[in-house]
Image (cartoon, rainbow, N blue to C red):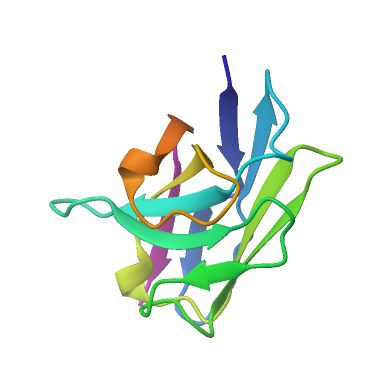
Amino acid sequence: QVQLVESGGGLVQAGGSLRPSCAASGRTISSSGMGWFRQAPGKEREFVAGISKTGISTYFADSVKGRFTISRDNAKNTVYLQMNSLKPEDTAVYYCAFGRYPSISYVDYEYDYWGQGTQVTVSS
């Protein structure tokens, strides 16, 4: 069984930065693509960013492209989401997910394990 624990969310002013991390236990992440999703109040969960098992390939939702980056440290079994130039519309609970495949998955049903989420709030 895989456990994912997110941390590093918080409250920040518009234009600021946060760097949530996701620590995995129970299984190595080195063979799997990893992803970040978010869910704002009253909205469906949406894909934010994904990274392949080696970290060579990454992909971002249009809404965060150029502002967010995703990285991974397989030795630490940890994935990171660097969020810069944050906007109020980035406010959501951010979830880390463990993919079923080595490549990037863009849909939530291709992820087998999920963290509990970390709240990100951006004030205007």
Left or right of residue 4: residue 113? left
In the picture shown, does residue 87 fall above or below 52?
A: below
State the image quarter where residue 40 is shown.
bottom left
The foreground one among 42 and 96 is 96
Dominant SS type (magenta)? strand
Residue lying furthest left: 42
The foreground one among 17 and 117 is 117
Left or right of residue 11: residue 92? left
In the picture shown, does residue 107 fall above or below 24?
A: below
The residue shown at (74%, 40%) is: 30
State the image coordinates of residue 19 (x, y, percent, origin top left).
64, 59
The foreground one among 118 and 44 is 44
State the image coordinates of residue 16 (x, y, percent, origin top left).
56, 76
Residue lying furthest top: 1
The residue shown at (48%, 58%) is: 11
The residue shown at (45%, 53%) is: 105
Left or right of residue 67: residue 56? right
Quadrant containing the N terminus is top right
State the image quarter where residue 3 is shown.
top right
Quadrant containing the C terminus is bottom left
Membership of 5 in magenta stretch: no
The residue shown at (48%, 52%) is: 36
Range of residues picked out in magenta: 117-124
